[in-house]
Image: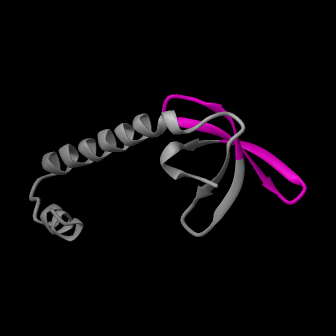
């Protein structure tokens, strides 16, 4: 099934209960993706954090179940953030 067909089907939904079921399924699918990709990440790995409007370079300092702690550097300033694995891309 194509993504456009799925989107069209979502707009055909008539009740809030059905939309809640769809959002739960999407949430579960995202967790599954994160759990499967968990084995691809390791401490010290350099990554790109993909955000909506930009990409930021960082280094993984800790790998959790669905998120990684990533040290991001903004010029001379560096700060650590909890980042979902789905937002990470290996460099």
Residue at horizontal 17%, vertical 61%?
10
Residue at horizontal 19%, vertical 43%?
21
Please state if 71 lies on the left or on the right of 31 as rendered.
right
Magenta residues (range): 59-81
Decide which of 25, 50 is in the foreground and name it.
50
| Outermost residue to the right | 76
Residue at horizontal 24%, vertical 43%?
25
Is 74 included in the stretch rendered in magenta? yes
Decide which of 17, 35 is in the foreground and name it.
35
Residue 29 sits in quarter: top left
Q: Position of residue 69 (x, y in %)?
A: 65, 37
Q: Position of residue 80 (x, y in %)?
A: 73, 41
Q: Main secondary structure of the magenta part?
A: strand
Is 76 included in the stretch rendered in magenta? yes
Residue 44 sits in quarter: top right
Please state if 22 lies on the left or on the right of 83 as rendered.
left
Relative to 73, does residue 28 appear above or below in the rendering? above
Decide which of 79, 17 is in the foreground and name it.
79
For the C terminus, which image quadrant?
bottom right
Q: Position of residue 63 (x, y in %)?
A: 60, 31
Q: Position of residue 57 (x, y in %)?
A: 71, 56
Residue at horizontal 71%, vertical 50%?
58
Please state if 40 lies on the left or on the right of 60 as rendered.
left
């Amino acid at each position: 099934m194509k993504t456009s067909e799925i989107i069209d089907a979502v707009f055909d939904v008539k009740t809030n209960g059905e939309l809640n079921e769809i959002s739960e399924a999407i949430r579960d699918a995202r967790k599954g993706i994160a759990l499967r990709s968990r084995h691809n990440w390791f401490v010290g790995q350099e990554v790109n954090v993909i955000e909506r409007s930009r990409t930021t370079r960082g280094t993984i300092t800790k790998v959790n179940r669905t998120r990684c702690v990533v040290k991001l550097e903004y010029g001379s300033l560096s700060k650590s953030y909890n980042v979902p694995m789905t937002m990470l891309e290996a460099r």
